[in-house]
Structure formats: C-alpha cells, structure tokens
Image (spheres, rainbow, N blue to C red):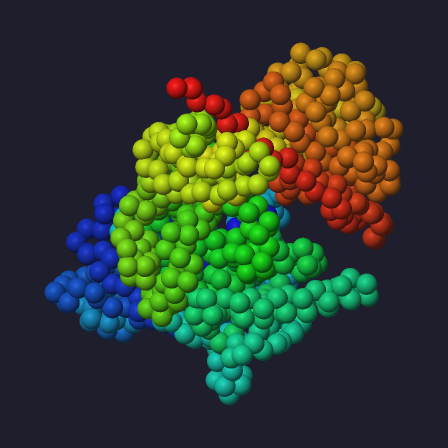
Amino acid sequence: MSILCRNVWSTARRRATGLLAAAGVLSAVLGCAAPGSFQATAYDIHVQLDPEAHHLRGRTVVTLQRPSPGLPGSRPVAVEFALNRALTIATVESQGATVREHTVRQPAGTALAGEPDNSALLNIHRLVLGSPTATPVLTFEYGGELIQDVQAGEKRGQVHNLLMAAHLGPEGIYLDSGGGWYPSVYQDPNQPRGELAAYRLTSAPVPGMRLVAGAAFDEVESQRSGELIWAGRYPMPGLVLVGGPHEVKQRSAGDVQLALHYSVPADAQPQATIEKHTELFLESAVQYLDRYQPLIGPYPFERYTIVENFFSSGFAFPEFTLLNKVLLQMGPRALMHGYLDHELLHSWWGNSIYVDPADGDWCEALTTYAANYYGYVLDGDEKGARNQRRNCCVAVSRLAPENEKPLGRFNRSGGPGREIGYSKGALVFHMLANRIGQDRFWSALRRLTEENTGRFANWQTLQRLFEGESGQSLEGFFQQWVRQAATPCLRLEAAVWEDAGQALDVTITQSPTAFALAVPLRVVREDGDIIDEVIEMSAPTVTVRLPLDQRPHAVVLDPDYHVLRKLLPSEIIPSGATTRAGRTLLVVTPDGPLSEFYTRAIEDFSGEAGSKEVVLRSHEAVTSDELRRHSVLVLGNAVHGPAVRALLAGADFPVHFAGEAFKVGDVTYEDPKQSVLCTVHHPDVPGGGITVYFGNSEGALGRSDLLLFYRDSLVIFETAGREVEGRMRYDSHVIGRQDFERLQTVAVTDGPHP
Ligand SMILES: [Zn+2]
C-alpha cells in the first residue's frame, strides 16, 4: 500500500495549471501594457484568522523585481495576481509605481489527470502599474470567508481529499498555496519557469488552536511581539498554513526538534490508544531521521512537526507533514513503509529541493524508491523488498498502451498517471542503483542535497550527479527509462540443452522496443540447486549459451523482479484488482436481502459509475455459461450454489467452504469473527479473475470498506464489532495472507543429437 501525496510544489503547480487555459485571453486584453515582466522576490503576509466565523483578514506586502533591466521604466506594466474568489481586496497601495488599473477576471480551468480542478476557487487580479521602478512594492488589504465542503472531497478507497485548498473552521485550518489565501503573482503557464521568493508570515494567535506554517517558526520574535511569526529558511514557491484544536508532544533528534500536534478524544479508552500511538509516530520519526540523514544528507530544517488533519491527507510541506487523524488511530499499521517515512523524505525532495516545473516530477519516484521500497531493504526484509519490486511491475503491467507515457513527463499536462510516476519511477531508481552501485547512488543524492537545497532540480540535474559519481555516461539509461514511453515485456522462449557442448542455450525476446537490459536468469538443476546468472541484452531476441556441468531442469526469468517489465497475465498475482479489471463483472449474490457490507463490496468492485457492466445473479439462477464468460465476484453463501462450486473446482480454488466455516490448506477457520477474501485467475477469461468474499457471520464482514486496499491473492480477516454511541464500529486485523505467484519458467529441452 503506498501513500500518494501532495507537497508544496504540487499545490503551487496545481494553481498554475488551473490557469493554463486563460493564457490566450490574457494576450488579447493586455493592450499596450507588457505582461509578466515582474516576478515576486518577497511576500510578507499578515493574517488574522477567526475560525468560528470562517473569516480571514489579510495584509500582504509583495516585493516585485523586474528581471529584464532593459525594459523602459516609463512604460506601464501589467502584473497578475491570483487570490481566492471569496476574498475581497479593499485596497492596493504601491511604492515605486502607481496602480493605473485594477481589473478582475475568472480563470478558465484545466486540471492535471487525477487532480480536481481548483481554479474555480480563484480570481485573477490584473494590475497595470505606471512608472514602475525596478523593485516596486505592493500592499494588499483583503478579507472574506473561506469555507469548503470538507465531505465533498472525501472518497472511500482514496487516501486524499484533493478538493481541499482553503478552509477555515472550528474543526481546523487548511490554507494551501493553491488556495489563494494571499495574493501571489500568477506565472505564465506557457513558460512554467518556476519562481522562488522569500516568505514571511505573521499571524495573530488563534485562541484554542495551534498553527503551523511551511516555514521556520521564529520563537524569539514571536515571544517578543505576542504574534506568531515564521520565515522561510530557503526561497520557496509558495506558503501553506494549517492548524487545529491540538495538544502537542515534543521530542528531539539531534539538532532537529520533533513535534506532534493532535486532538485528544473525549473517551478514556481511545484517549489511551492515541497517547500510545503519538509516542509511536514520534519514535518512528526519530528512527527515520537516524536512517536517512547518513544516506542523503542533513535534514534541511530545524523542526519537523506531524500535524493531525481534519480531512483525508498525507501531505508533505516544508517543516511539517499533515496526516489524516485516521492514521494516528491506526497506529502501527500506519507506520508501514510508504507513510510517514515517505512524507518525511519529501522534506528533502519536493519541499527544499524543488521540482523544476519545466521538466517532469522526479520527486515522487525518488521518494517512493527510498521510503516505500528501500525502507524494507534497510530493515533487512528481503521478502518485503521483493514484494515492492513485484508490485511496481504489476502496477505498470495493467496499463493500457495509451497510458504508457514517459516517466519524465509525470505531473505535467498530458503526462502519465501514478503507476508510472510512483511505481515505474521507483523501480527505475532501483535499476540505476544496481547499475552504478548502491554506495555511489547514495553519494550522488548527498551531493543533490549539498548543491540544490533551496533550488529547483530536474531529471538532468539527477543524471549529471549520478554520472559524476559513477564516472559513466547514463544518457542511454535515462533516455530509455525516463524520456521514452514504453516498458519492455520479456518472454523466456526456450532453454535447450546441448549435450555435446555441455551448455544451455537460453532464448529471450523483448517487445515492443529493444531496451538495453541486464536480465537475471535462474537455472534450476535436477537436484533443486540453483545458479543465478545475469544476461545483458539489447536486441529484440537474444540467445545466450551458458556452459554448465550437467543438464539442468528448468530456467526462471527474473525471479526476484529486478527489471521493470510488463508481466505476462499469468505472472501477475491474482488479487481483487484482477477481478475488477474487466469490462464486465458478474456478481453472484447470497440468499436473502443483500447486507450493506456486500453492497459496499459490489460498489468497490464496480469502480466508477458507468465504467463497466455489472450483472447481479443469485446463486440459484447463475448459469455455468455466464460464469465462464466474465470475471466473477462471489459473495457469502453463494459459494454453495452448484454452478459456482463447479467453477471454483475447475479453477483449483484454494479455499473450501462448509456451512459457516472455511478451510485453507489444513487450517479450518470457524470463528464467527473470521472472513476471507480470495482471488484466482479465471481459467476461461484471459486477464480475468474469480474473487470470493465470505464471512463466517455478518459481523465478520464489518470492514468491507478495506477490501480495495489489499493486493494479496488471499487475505483472512478477524473483525470485531462494538457499539459506540448507538452505532456499530468494527475493527479488523489480518490473520493470514498469501500470494499465488507463478513465475515465468521454461522446462529445459534437449537439442538435436548430432
Ligand atoms: Zn509523495
């Protein structure tokens, strides 16, 4: 399970892309004023927040600078600012220029794939400045109510509420740089050069709330002035301010001050749990700093604060991480790799070394590699690491050809989705580390920190650093994996034993294009011993001769998933996603009225409304013919229907059902709290699946909302329900899981005898 996240760069970027379509309009209305000639070098933001009234009052002083000194000073210059539509500008004062004109327009919206379009939140204020000096200063006074519908962006099965951008309320404060809570210079989206400025923020204290901004808290100045003051340690692309009715716990890790801001539940039992979990989170943050600073260089800030959030999020910002409170309630399970470690690593990659908006987003790939994957390596958990590599291959294997886009265009308009940006990207860094050596890999990343903190970096920056450390050209590597769109699909075609020469000829093909690859091969001898080889290939077909002292039994292709490749359908481990992937889903329903738990499972397996045809059949009515033609979801006691029994038997389904119990291997699960989710490949539907969701009792299905999160072939849950304030609350944990893995293997055959 990996977390997706937003960082300060992506919120700033989102704002910019939201305004993309307005560019054409802009040039038509500008007249004689020259656009975009100024950039902001400093923002000094003052706010007074009243969460009860959702009200923000602000005064922002923006220092502008003319980048092109040749521009005649007397000519009027237009500058555009984005500001939340709910905020009204009362006055604009200027020093070093006169404000000749102030008009307001609405941006036309466009959004990145997978991100909602928040441009509707913004207004564009166009100011024409007369007789500007080289560094005019504008002071905006503004105010209004910032309210968003928090629930509208909450979606089951999705980790993040991406609709949220600017909200002030008693439950919490969330003001991100894309939400327009201060006026910021609008950049020309056709030339996304990315601009960094100095930020300073002053806020009056908000009674009952603790505020955190994405900048360094100035304790001395704050105490002296009675206000809360922050200043960015480095130039930044934007500023975020959050807060909530929180308690605080602190810890120190060397020079870094750690804190956790959280709300205390009213009940004694949840209170004790939360207190325990907050300790765990802080302890984990200490460990992560200990493990990553030696690898990638010193943590770039003085503070790291984990802030509990009032909506679904795992957002990383400079100096802090904003975490969904559900994660704090989950405790240890929310500390798997890919959660807090991933967000913490964005302190380096994304939030102090910024993603150059003129190139694709490299920071998610690198962060996913170092946290979600390499976390297991650092634990010494080779099985966990292998699972992650396999998951990366599975993620790209299900991509339709039209969604195969270059990694180097991730988070750019028309770029690829997260399977490429996160999963492919992580495995590309794994292959790179294998190629140049793990020590040189980390040493290049330490140099990235040394040389690029407070600056933009792009894929070329990384390539140059890795080349510098390894002393080899990586042009071909970056071309094929970062700039090119395809992912190779490898086939082990044959393994032929030449008795006369005492050698094995192994033939491998790749499609659709010829990549330069180092492909691991495992030769399995008759006695079960194995010999691991690595084959270099760059042609569509290659046959290699391996001298061996005896005829082996079989050959396995890349058994530990070290090469990013599209797996054959038979190699992809079956999981709920296999059954969900088809165009049609046949659901076989149990006796009696459908419980809400089954309804939820059907909804989750059906995907977005209208995305596929869903056919519901009772287990008495469903025919063998229907079951043969589609991916199938079987619910509860529908497993006992005669046609379903025949289907499961034909698919070698590894779970057996009897009354209100089920059996896996030799183990019988008969506790009413137990349930099972199991998927196998559908023998008659290529790429399709058969999934059974079965509970020994109704209550065992209480957490059917979690099914989508599991990528395993078989998961056994134990679920307990209790009544809280008149409603049932269910807690479940996993007591068993298995993956039905089928590696790409060929049996050795004998060559022609001379
Ligand atoms: Zn991330």
Is 736 situated left or right of 720 in this image?
Answer: left
Q: Is residue 143 left or right of residue 28?
A: right
Residue closer to the observer: 436 or 104: 436
Q: Position of residue 405 (x, y in %)?
A: 38, 38
Residue 615 location, x and y as percent? Answer: 66, 20
Q: Nearer the viewer, residue 193 or 517?
A: 517
Rendered position, 541 above or below 270: above
Residue 611 is situated, as x and y percent measured from the top left of the image, at 55, 28
* Left or right: 458 as drawn, with respect to 172: left
- Is residue 447 in sight in this rendering? yes
How many tags in the picture? Answer: 0
Instruction: Give the quadrant of the C terminus.
Output: top left
Q: Quadrant of residue 575?
A: top right
Location of residue 42 by image quarter: bottom left
Vertical placement of 209 versus 571: above or below? Answer: below
Determine the residue positioned at 62% across, 76% down.
250
Residue 183 vs residue 31, the one in the foreground: 183
- Is residue 310 among what the camera can see? no
Q: Image quarter for residue 451?
A: bottom left
In the image, what residue occupies the spot 31% across and 33% down? 539
| Picture coordinates of residue 428, whole percent (x, y) | 41, 48
Left or right of 215 in this view: 734: right
Up-down: is 676 above or below 152? Answer: above
Q: Is residue 734 above or below residue 72?
A: above
Q: Residue at x 55, y 60 (%)?
A: 378
Point 28% across, 68% down: residue: 64
Which residue is the extreme one toward the bottom?
Answer: 224
The answer to which of 566 and 578 lies nearer the viewer is 566
